[in-house]
Image: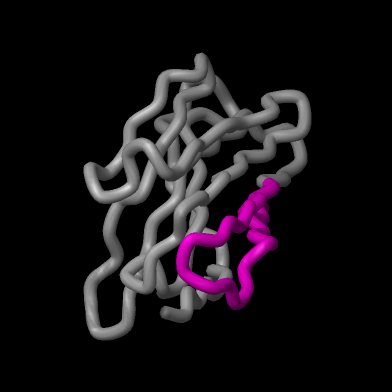
């Protein structure tokens, strides 16, 4: 089975920075694209950033120039460096990864439990 575990959330003042980490684990699993989604209070979960196993990245317009996604393939870990944080960045950040055990399988999306980020004004 696959486990996806996030860490690094917390409370920060506007203009501050946080770094989120997410580790994917599963015996004999390979992991493909990884990414982060934000569920703000009262809103649906939305894309923040994704990164492929080859390092190609995609960002929501609202975070471009402020957030940076990166990954360590040897550790099956993805990071989200968040700078110049704004109150509207507040919410639960969920990590996702695509994983599969066998090369003939399709990729399955796995989600973490989420980590709370609160940005005070």
Task: Determine whether 31 is above or below 84 in the image.
Answer: above
Q: Please give the range of residues in magenta.
A: 1-23
In this rendering, the count of numbered labels is 0
SS majority, magenta? strand
Locate the C terminus and report the quarter of the image it occupies.
bottom left
Between 14 and 39, the one nearer to me in the picture: 14
Residue at point 29% right, 65% down? Answer: 45
Between 121 and 101, the one nearer to me in the picture: 121
Residue at point 62% right, 29% down? Answer: 30
Q: Is residue 59 left or right of residue 112?
A: left
Residue at point 64% right, 50% down? Answer: 22
Residue at point 43% right, 47% down? Answer: 109
The chosen color scheme is one colour
Is residue 16 one of those drawn in magenta?
yes
The part of the image, by quadrant, that contains residue 11 is bottom right
The part of the image, by quadrant, that contains residue 44 is bottom left
Q: Is residue 54 left or right of residue 49?
A: right
Between 119 and 45, the one nearer to me in the picture: 119
Q: Picture coordinates of residue 76 (x, y %)?
A: 69, 35
- Residue furthest to the bottom in view is 42
- Residue furthest to the top in view is 54
Q: Picture coordinates of residue 60 (x, y %)?
A: 27, 44
Q: Picture coordinates of residue 85 (x, y %)?
A: 45, 60
């Amino acid at each position: 089975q696959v486990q996806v575990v996030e860490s690094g959330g917390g409370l920060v003042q506007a203009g501050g920075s946080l770094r989120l980490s997410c580790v994917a684990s599963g015996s004999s699993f390979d992991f493909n694209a990884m990414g982060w989604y934000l569920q703000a209070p009262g809103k649906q979960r939305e894309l923040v950033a994704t990164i492929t196993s080859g390092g190609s990245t995609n960002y929501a317009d609202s975070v471009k120039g402020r957030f940076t996604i990166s990954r360590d393939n040897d550790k099956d870990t993805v990071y989200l460096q968040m700078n110049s944080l704004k109150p509207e960045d507040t919410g639960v950040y969920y990590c996702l990864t695509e994983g599969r055990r066998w090369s003939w399988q399709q990729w399955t999306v796995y989600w973490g439990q989420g980590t709370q980020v609160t940005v005070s004004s």
